[in-house]
Amino acid sequence: HRLYYTPKVLEEFEALAAEILAAQKRVVRNNEVWDFSVAVLKRWIQDIPRRRADLIPSFEKRLEKLVARAKVQPPPNPISFRIVKSLLTPLARGIPKIARD
């Protein structure tokens, strides 16, 4: 899946990851770090101890909604586009053209 971590969506993913990790046993909390992977979040949800199993449905629902939002490609940022264009245009003009006979 291609996910777009816009600042708002990334913030929500990080908050969810922190909450899921907080529901884990101490040994897991102390040894795991979220690597921006949905697969890791799903694995953490599956590994939640039974005493906190009531949290699993809400975590799964939130994760599903976040993944759906992250799949939507954000519109291009016009400022970034202008910056990249201003950097690439001189490079493109400096490439010699090959004449065809």
Image (cartoon, helix red, strand yellow):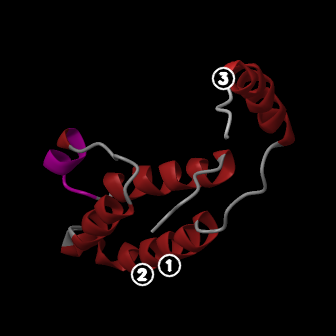
Q: Nearer the viewer, mark 2 or mark 1?
A: 1
* Type of amino acid at the residue the image marks with label 2: Pro
Whether pointer 3 and pointer 1 mark residues with C-beta atoms closer than 8 Å, the reply is: no
**x and y percentages locating residue 5 in the rendered image:** 58, 51
**x and y percentages locating residue 79 in the rendered image:** 84, 34
The first of marks 3 and 2 along the sequence is: 2
Q: Residue at x 49, y 48 (%)?
A: 14
SS state under label 2: helix
Q: Residue at x 66, y 68 (%)?
A: 72
Residue 57 is labelled as 2
| In the image: residue 22, left or right of residue 16 | left
Q: Residue at x 37, y 56 (%)?
A: 37
Q: Which residues are magenta?
A: 24-30
Whether pointer 3 and pointer 2 mark residues with C-beta atoms closer than 8 Å, the reply is: no
Q: Nearer the viewer, residue 95 or 58?
A: 95
Which residue is tagged 3? 96
Q: Residue at x 18, y 50 (%)?
A: 28
Residue 61 is labelled as 1
SS state under label 1: helix
* Type of amino acid at the residue the image marks with label 3: Pro
Q: Nearer the viewer, mark 3 or mark 1?
A: 3
**x and y percentages locating residue 20 in the rendered image:** 37, 59
Q: CA distance from mark 2 to mark 1?
A: 6 Å
